[in-house]
Image: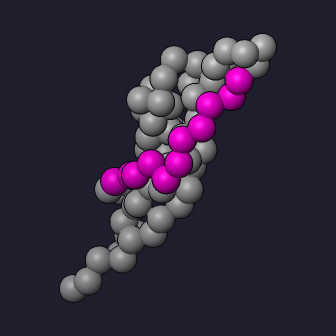
Amino acid sequence: MSTVARVTEIIASSKKSFDDAVEVGVRRATKTLKNVAGAWVASQEVVIEKGKISAYRVRLKVTFVLAD
């Protein structure tokens, strides 16, 4: 028997850190998607306002296994 998985992209942000943005994204993904198996950070960026970082953003690739 083979396993079929799918990858979807999620963009998440945090005012604290990149790590927190990843946590936010994973929490959100697991609320909507079933059988989340893993995730990786495809890119990171910051939003700068008035010379200071106002938000940390990550683009996550989330893998989830499709049900039989």
**Residue farthest to the bottom?**
1
Of 28 and 17, which appears nearest the observer?
A: 17
Q: Residue at x 47, y 65 (%)?
A: 7
Q: Residue at x 56, y 56 (%)?
A: 9
Residue 10 lies, with reference to residue 2, above or below; the image says: above
- Quarter of the picture holding the N terminus: bottom left
User: In the figure, residue 19 lies in which quadrant?
Assistant: top left
Q: Main secondary structure of the magenta part?
A: strand
How does the figure colour the protein chain or chains? one colour
Of 36 and 20, which appears nearest the observer?
A: 20
Q: Residue at x 48, y 23 (%)?
A: 17
Segment colored magenta: 38-48
Q: Residue at x 76, y 19 (%)?
A: 49
Q: How many marks?
A: 0
- Would you say 45 lies left or right of 2 here? right
Residue 37 lies, with reference to residue 49, above or below; the image says: below
Is residue 8 among what the camera can see? yes
Residue 38 lies, with reference to residue 45, above or below; the image says: below
User: In the figure, residue 52 lies in which quadrant?
Assistant: top right
- Would you say 4 lies left or right of 20 here? left
**Residue farthest to the right?**
50
Of 68 and 44, which appears nearest the observer?
A: 44
- Quarter of the picture holding the C terminus: bottom left
Is residue 32 among what the camera can see? no
- Would you say 51 lies left or right of 9 here? right
Q: How far across and how far down the image is residue 67, in percent?
A: 38, 69
Q: How far across and how far down the image is residue 14, in percent?
A: 56, 25
User: In the figure, residue 35 lies in which quadrant?
Assistant: bottom left
Q: How far across and how far down the image is residue 60, in percent?
A: 50, 49
**Residue farthest to the front?**
51
